[in-house]
Amino acid sequence: MADERDGALSSRILQVLRAGRRGNATLEQLRRATGASGRDLESAVSALEESGEVVRMPRKRLALAERSGLRTGTVRIERSGRALVILDVPAAPLVLERSALRPAMDRDRVLVEETPYSRGGLHHAKIHRVLERGRERLIGVAAPKAPRRILPLDERVGPYLVLLAPDSEPAPLGQAVATRIVEYPSGHRDILVRVEEVLGELGLLGTEIRTVCASLGIEEEFDDEVLAEAAAFGEPSAADLAGRVDLRQTLTITVDPADAKDHDDAVSVQKLDGPGGGYRLIVSIADVSHYVRPGSRLDDEAFERSTSVYFPGTSVPMLPERLSGDLASLHPGVDRLAVSAFLDIDERGRVRSSSFARSVIHSVASLTYEQVQSVLDGGEQAGVSAEVRDALGEMGHLAALLCQRRMQRGAIDMDLPESVIELDERGEVGTIRKRPRLFAHRLIEEFMLAANEAVATRIDRADQAFLYRIHERPDDDAISELAVRVKALGLRLEREGALVEPAMFQHLLAAAADSPFARQVNVMVLRTMTQARYSAEKGIHFGLASRCYTHFTSPIRRYPDIVAHRALLAVEGRDSAGGGNAGGCDASDGAAAVALAAGEARPARAAVLPSREALRPVAEHTSKRERRAMEAERDVAKGAAVLYMQRWLGKRLEGTVSAVDRYGFNVELDVAFVEGFVHVGRLREYFDYVAERMELQSRVSSACIRIGDRIKVRVAALDLASRRIDLEPA
């Protein structure tokens, strides 16, 4: 109640300040306007100051930060050293000179003042105040000649000295250590830390993974209470199966990467007879909500983590192994609890009807993408029965129909191959190769997209609050920049009318598909896009050309999918109670409240799901956790590339120019799916960057460097801390 009262008073203060012509007032004026006591008023004002919404002015006046030329945002320091402020209110980022960064660090939330000075189209800023620190720990190594000094392994911390506190244990030489920040930088002081944990020997992949997790606050272990809760569950019993649709006699398979850590989804396709024909697609998803109940420690932990994080050879799961790798994982040959979507699809790829139910399945086969592709190509696969081969043929035909339908409505299909990092017998990086994109991948993607969209539509039409997966349209500036860049490659970004549509990007990618710069165009389009996120409010998914979309198909590894399951089961349960399709749904279970991290009471079973307002912090938290996981996975992948290239240091290699800018060019190497960078300073001639053709042109000869050129290079230097592979012409 006290928190609600403080929040209401804070809102009232902001209303009073916004209503004033100057946007400021004295404490006495605010007291009279709000009727609050002096103590309550000071408490509310202090909270508003901490959030950066209000600032104190001369003559004891309080003012809205937004009216005082101040803005809030988060400091982001790039590996190049450039410091930006990413504003809370979406706008172009502001630049911080390194000399103006103090006392802020990377990830800090700050109050800044925008300056008139600009360069490269971005305005500069200066720090007014640090509102919230983004780091509690620093990862580093002891300096060889100054062991009480720590050298951060992440250069993005900022231009500060990091010293051990007098009471800290020393850091072992050559070992990465996790330290707790004791004193943050100020106008005259650097950073003081205390050693908390030794992470391992530098230069090993395992150390890199632990380092990244410690740096980003990713907890690798579960506490005993969470593990005990998961361990208490047993194999599905007769009581667990009661009321469920029995799909154990329906031919069902799972298809996953060979190194999959969990199996969320299983699929079945049946050819429909009668008028119109078509197919019935059954997408069965692990019924994680059966195990992860609101109010439980498992739910608390799943919400806090929000997503699994995947690294070469290992992962940090959202749920303990007992669930993620066993009971909730749809293994073949055993009964597993699921939530199934039944989609009837016609011969034009249109979903004619859909229904949903809690179910029990019994998968007959766990296949890899490579096995499925071999069958689709007409090859024989040991252990794959004739019945499964026939089913895969039907699945391939249906997936092609669904894909064609999506492309017709304008969905963007980017071709950005992933790298596969394979480990040797020591657990270190053995090879890095490009993962081929097979039609088998598309087959499962199409089925999951169709299920996600059907679930979102069902819950949305029932007016039940849940988490949408949204992807806003890119802004005009980003589109204009893309148009200029692709024009340099001889391509056109054709825009019809004022509204930006996904089809314009689809046409661009199709035009570039067979060119030597196809991958670079895909990268450019990706960078033009906004970042997809979770939202309690409905919005489009631009990339999929979908008006209503959610994540439903991966509840083992994504918390928003659990939210979707609970909402769907609540809707189905209500319809069942009203005489609709029962579908085996347990209404009381499906209507259990989603766990929130707001400190409020969290009943094990509640009568209603949360409102959209209550889901807003869930959307924000899960979106942040998703971005953290992506950052961790990218960082480890880049570190693995540097570790792999150590065997090639000083050697000549061949590759293809994959990107060009004024500072140099990237080269994708033939020996592995790895890129390095050639700085213009390493070239034997002086080159100018010709922006309109996106190429480097020599001043002294006819030499020209373009995307798609073949080139011989030498691996000149490697820097694990900065994740940099420096190349030079060979």
Image (cartoon, rainbow, N blue to C red):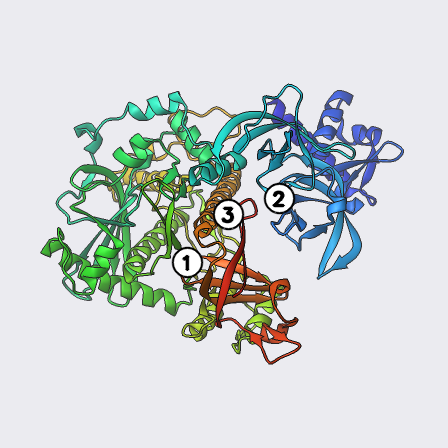
- Residue mark closest to the camera, 2 vs 3: 2
Nearest the eye: 574 or 647: 647
Q: Can residue 317 be seen here?
A: yes
Type of the residue with mark 3: Glu
Tell me the kind of residue under disc 1.
Answer: Phe
Q: Nearer the viewer, mark 1 or mark 3?
A: 1
Left or right: residue 31 compared with residue 685? right
Q: Is residue 12 left or right of residue 199?
A: right
State yes or no: discs 1 and 3 in contact (Cβ < 8 Å). Answer: no
Q: Which residue is mark 1?
A: 673
Label 1 crowd bin: few (<14), some (14–19), many (20+), radius 10 Å: some
Q: Amino acid at mark 2?
A: Arg
Compare marks 2 and 3 and give the one earlier in the sequence.
2
Q: Nearer the viewer, residue 493 or 34?
A: 493
Which residue carries the number 3 mark?
Answer: 537
Picture residue at 28% right of the left edge, 53% below the top:
354
Q: Name the N-terminal-most of marks 1 and 3.
A: 3
Q: Position of residue 477 (x, y in %)?
A: 63, 64
